[in-house]
Amino acid sequence: MTKDQWGALQDSICKTIGENNYKTWIQPLSFDGMRDEGVVVLQAPTSFFGTYVSQNFGDLLLSQLSTVDTGVRRLAFEVANTRPSEPPRPARVEPPQAAQKDDLPGAPLDARFTFDSFVVGKPNELAHAAARRVAEGGPVTFNPLFLYGGVGLGKTHLMHAIAWELQARNPQLTVLYLSAEQFMYRFVQALRERRMMDFKEMFRSVDVLMVDDVQFIAGKDSTQEEFFHTFNALVDQNKQIVISADRAPDEIKDLENRIRSRLQSGLVVDLHPTDYELRLGILQTKVDSYRSLYPGLTIDEGVLEFLALRISTNVRVLEGALTRLFAFASLVGRPIDMDLVNDSLSDVLRASERKISIEEIQRKVAEHYNIRLSDMIGPKRVRNFARPRQVAMYLCKQLTRRSLPEIGRRFGGRDHTTVMHGVRRIEELRQSDSQIDEDVEMLRRALEA
Ligand code: ADP
Ligand code: MG
């Protein structure tokens, strides 16, 4: 993402949000650069301004940016510095927002990462409940709270939500959020500048410390050591600590044992991989928030279900897909339907291709209905075989990327119109026959597991 690309997007941003909004909120921003991990930094006149833009136009800006650069993940706002004699800014993104005291070396909090925008489902309900409890700010009951789980499952979102909530309940509280990488960076900087006392004092003076992606300090011995001391000092003062990592404490290699056991001494909760319902819920919430940004855009039923089925690993990728759909639809003035999905998301879909094969589906369905595979594929039209056959065709259409003619061929050389008829029939039956609906749902789960 470059300054020129940002410039070239202005017209379409203006068209989407209207001239008034554009002049008030977007024009005053200036493009600063793109940092690690796809963070695009924009300069805003004040910190409130940045937070407002992030909350109200953040998703829209992200979606527009991602049309020119798919590497863009997040926005960060810096307060524009007009004094020319100011020393150069440090390499890290500085916090512009009110939630962190100006002299603390924290990372910016994403205004979108609140409890309100976090969708709770089975896979994350424990982590969410624990985060809520910590965010209430009462007496410290478990220390640290250790959240772990795979990439894009909401660890950073929950940590930011805790920080926002604590800050809202008690503005006096000093909440410091930063990544383990930033912790190391600060530590090394303090060593270099011979300001270790300041460093220690500063970290020991916070009320709540949150360190994201702590697996990063594994193998980095002196950083680990310093982290350990900071950690102990805060626990001794009964200050809350929240840690995240991409795996459980005992699975982080090259971590000193005393640190490992410290990390395990509080509450350890994991975020499980998302399930279909949670993914659908997240998409629906997202669509609701897009509605006001893109008035007039229609979204076909079935598109969300398709995305929730097909993009199953990483919520970030799922959101990115939806964001891209909205951006494309608004750019080219098309409705969001399966055609648009196929035109604009082919790379995403290919990357998250399920490994479910037609054979697997046929075998599972035959087993479920207690018929032979050869009867399912064979020519017999008796109802006992025809219905399972249609269910299998329907699932092939839903769970694989095979075309109707291809599916037809694999069902004993049937015509694509036969497959289409079968798929439609099951769609209808799912509305009217709860037994069929349950069967299909159960089979889908079994195949996806
Ligand atoms: P992690 O830190 O675990 O890698 P993030 O917290 O950065 O993941 O989440 C990735 C993206 O997915 C973010 O945009 C976040 O808002 C979104 N996300 C993840 N889980 C949820 C959820 N349960 N509800 C709403 N959004 C979610
Ligand atoms: Mg994260």
Image (cartoon, helix red, strand yellow):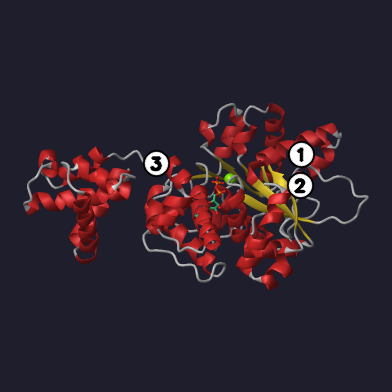
- CB at disc 2 and ligand 2 closer than 8 Å: no
Secondary structure beneath label 1: helix
Left or right, 210 with reference to 271: right
How much space separates mark 1 and mark 2, taking CA atoms?
8 Å
- Which disc is residue 119 wearing? none
- The label nearer to you, 2 versus 3, is 3
Left or right, 210 with reference to 191: left
- CB at disc 1 and ligand 2 closer than 8 Å: no
Using the image, determine if residue 201 lies above or below residue 319: above
Dot 1 and dot 2 residues touching (CB under 8 Å): yes
How much space separates mark 2 and mark 3, taking CA atoms?
41 Å
Judge by depth and name the residue closer to the eye, 233 or 320: 320
Judge by depth and name the residue closer to the eye, 445 or 360: 360
Q: Residue 109 at what x, y percent from top left?
A: 67, 54
Kind of residue sitting beneath label 2: Pro
First-in-chain label (2 vs 3): 2
Residue on which the image places disc 2: 105
Judge whether residue 85 can be spotted in this image: yes
Q: Residues within 10 Å of mark 1 (few under 14, many from 20)?
A: some
Residue on which the image places disc 1: 186
What residue appears at the point 61 percent right and 38 percent down from the top-left corner?
A: 214
What residue appears at the point 52 percent right and 68 percent down from the top-left corner?
A: 291
Kind of residue sitting beneath label 1: Arg
Kind of residue sitting beneath label 3: Glu
Secondary structure beneath label 2: loop
Residue on which the image places disc 3: 353
